[in-house]
Amino acid sequence: MKNRMIVFVLGLAAAAAPLLAQTSPLQLPSPVEKELAARAANVTEVTLGKNMLAFAAKFMNDKNKNDEAARQLIEGLDGIYVRDYEFDKPGQYSMVDIDKLRRSFEGPEWTPIVRARDRKSGETTDVMMKMVNGQSRGMFVLSAEPKELSIVLILGPIRMNQLGQLKGLSGLSALGNATNTRQGNEKGKDKKGGVQ
Amino acid sequence: MRPWLWVPLCFIALLIPVVVLAGGGSGFNGVVNSIESRYHVRATQIPFMGLASLIANRATDGGVDDVHVAEFKHFSKPVDGEELNRIAEKKLGPGWERMIRETSRTGREHTLIFSRPEGKRMGLFVIDLDGHELDVVQVSVNPNRMNQTIAQYSHNQHHQEKSD
């Protein structure tokens, strides 16, 4: 009887695990998030779940070319999550924090596609793609400036050519940097004959 | 009436004011009541809010409806963003999803925006603390109507610019 109870409880826990995971889709280590939030002067969180995106997509103007492209992009997405931390002065977060954030996306499904560093300005941009069966199923952008740290996580099928359409949305300006950097890298790649 | 029925009836009658005073209820009033009881403040009553809501509905051709506003002036109590968020989530209940949360370390600026699909409309619930003023707003918008209104104004403006 006791064994049956244990099996039942474990089964229940296994069934509940994906549900619990859904409630926290932004796979960031929460201690890092809390530490960053405590040090930041301003914190902005944008959370757009699948339901809200599907609902918003319904009301995008089909006649407007930009709206139509954005609608096509967001109606298939599972969620858009943004965190933006603004700091009073440089040095209020460390590279250790950045590495912790990066490590949380170091799974087999996540592939780094852009890693840009600017020593002069101290800016870094990381873009990782979630690839499932050769198809992009998510994107993680980490943009760090001396006084600002932006994290964007998009889950669901993504068409890179349409991604720029989202940068007008609140908090998603980092996507503009990401797509520009990616395009720049691709141009650089072409010039160097495919050598990065 | 049977005498033993008076006991539960009296209990319920006593319970109702206790629940109301403790910030009972849900939705807009639930959040406002909870803020009032937690921070010992009172929302400024805005007269003719129902009329204003009706006018907003007519003026936007149904684009905006069901407007609720509560204003807390001289709000000087320190606010914990986490707690304010918990109050809102608890009182709004299921269906509402938090879209945007903005907090400042000083604790004097907090913005929470919740939304929920309401058929063809979208419900928006905003709590905004800016300095010493806290505003709570709930509104139901029809995005299609809003799009049409915006397009109409854009068209008129474009037309006017052309004629100039």
Image (cartoon, coloured by chain):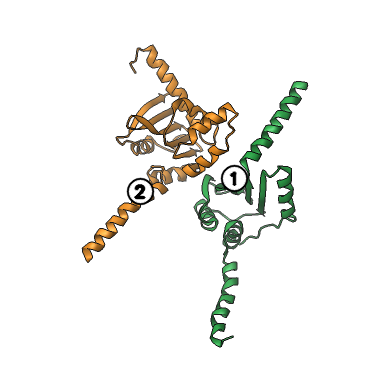
Of badges 1 and 2, nearer the viewer stands 1
CB atoms of marks 1 and 2 within 8 Å: no
Labels 1 and 2 share a subunit = no
Residue type beneath disc 2: Pro
Q: Quadrant of the N terminus of chain A?
A: bottom left
Q: Which residue is mark 2?
A: A18
Q: What is the letter of the green chain?
A: B
Q: Is residue A18 above or below residue B148?
A: below
Residue underneath mark 1: B120
Residue A119 x/y as whole percent:
41, 24
Q: Residue at x 35, y 12 (%)?
A: A193
Figure chain in orange: A
- Classify residue A16 as left or right of residue B164: left
Q: Quadrant of the C terminus of chain A?
A: top left
The crowd level at tag 1 (other Cα within 10 Å; few <14, some 14-19, many 20+) is: few
Taking the image as drawn, is residue B95 in sight?
yes
What is the secondary structure assignment of the residue under circle 1? loop
